[in-house]
Image (cartoon, rainbow, N blue to C red):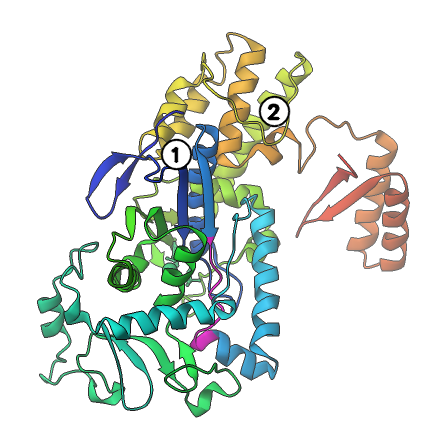
Amino acid sequence: MDIVKLYNTQTRKIEDIISGEPDGILRIYCCGPTVYNYAHIGNFRTFLLQDVLRRLFLTMGYSVKFVRNITDIDDKTIRGAQLENISLRSFTERWTDIFHRDCEALNILPPNVEPKAASHIAEQIAMIETLIQKKHAYIAADGSVYFRLSSFSDYGKLSRIDIKQLATQSENSAGRINLADEYDRDSVHDFALWKAYKAEDGDVFWESPWGKGRPGWHIECSAMSMKYLSETIDIHGGGIDLCFPHHENEIAQTECVTGKPFVRHWFHSEHLQVEGQKMSKSLGNLFTLADLKDKGYDAPIVRYALISGHYRQILNFTLSGLDAARSALAKLKTKIANLLKKSNFSFNEGFFPQDMTYYHFGTAIEALKNDLNIPKCLGEIFSVLNNVKNVESFLEELYVLCFILGIERSIFYGEQNPITVEIPSDIAELAAQRWEAKRNKNFTESDRLRQLLIQRGWNIIDQKDRYELEKMGS
Ligand code: AMP
Ligand code: ZN
């Protein structure tokens, strides 16, 4: 096994990653999406970086168990279901399916376990009961349960937030404590483990020893990581915004229940900005995968652009960055297509090389092993691209790198714009006629020609102002 080194948000040091459990399995938990709408490309930056890290571990010979949850109970999912007058379950299942489809298009490996908060109410209630018994939590008059922050002296150890400073910050400019009474909490920073039922929750509630209600957000990750991984996990990931309060709260809850450290290594990725600004609906710069597809950028291009910055730096997403990603991928594809013609190299999906010697791309691999330096890795790949010492090993090494980066499908299998498949001239002619018919809004004719192409084994993928031909089954 080759050791990967990563920056640990808690110790603020770059450390070797090794499983802390006797079975040697590296246990990774990442906070997943809240399923109430399309995930945006900022969310995907985080999920993609976690995917590259996981692929790196797999390639370096680690055994990995990767859990990423689905947050299906929160104000946004409840309001969304109510607006459509459907059950919370149907609403969140639909958005979960859409999330899965986007993940598939982006070539993000599915987690080994993907638990949902709403399917783990009993586990969350059990944890809350233990916290009450141990006097780390208390029941408020309305039946909500709060974690007593003052009962956990280590609070703030991850983000190094000073709880005393928090206390002063909680006073507003008029010097009044921010609405502590309204929430019935002993201290304004105590956070909800269980939220008592309110009329606006409609039919969303579960019974509990404290009356009907629903779990607070933070407790689901503590309960589910413990159930599917262990009391102490090796790596916990999420976007940097989750560091405080979400991850601090997870630490407090879990460590007060188990009396053991919760996480050995924290992996936080920086945010994505768009054209230098925070993404927001009101600025009109919040993109989904579908928005970018409409602009002519397919998922592999988006993947490449989103992983290309260092995970500990803010990435500024621009459309010109997507164009650069398109050219970089095209350059790699062309190079590989040419070399494939000259070699007997064959790749098999899910192939993890052990103790491979890198004759060409050693520095690129080292960059990944050393704090997941993807920009350095990409720079190295392009700097050696024309320095082929041996075609077979060049392709093998490049395949490994493309697998880690998650671009192997589009580069080696010719997912789009098939690189190894020649388009016969009669097929190209039919496709051109069909495009012409479509542009002239002659839809009967364009459908007829599309059917003809399908019968001949060719699919047409329409973009906004162009089309691509794909050999079916290739
Ligand atoms: P959510 O669906 O809001 O729970 O977020 C899912 C993941 O996306 C979390 O790990 C967030 O930290 C992360 N995230 C949210 N906004 C951004 C952003 N602009 N850039 C990168 N990651 C983000
Ligand atoms: Zn979480």
The amino acid sitting under disc 1 is Ile
The stretch drawn in magenta includes residue 370: no
Q: Mark 2 belongs to which amino acid?
A: Thr
Please identify the quarter of the rendering in which residue 149 is found: bottom left
- Residue at image x 79%, y 30%? 423
Give the side of residue 9 with respect to residue 436, left or right: left
Majority SS type along the magenta span: loop
**Foreground of the two, 18 or 406:** 18
SS of the residue under disc 2: helix
Image quarter where the C terminus lies is: top right
Mark 2 lies on residue: 334
Q: Nearer the viewer, residue 99 or 434?
A: 99
Task: Name the residue beneath numbered marker 1.
Answer: 374
Q: Quadrant of the N terminus?
A: top left
Give the SS element for disc 1.
Answer: helix
For the residue with label 1, is its CB less than 8 Å from the closest atom of ligand 1? no
Q: Identify the residue shown where x is 55% and y is 19%.
A: 396
Residue at figure coordinates x 53%, y 63% from the top left: 38
Q: Position of residue 220 (x, y in %)?
A: 40, 65
Q: Is residue 248 left or right of residue 432?
A: left
Give the extent of the magenta segment: 68-76
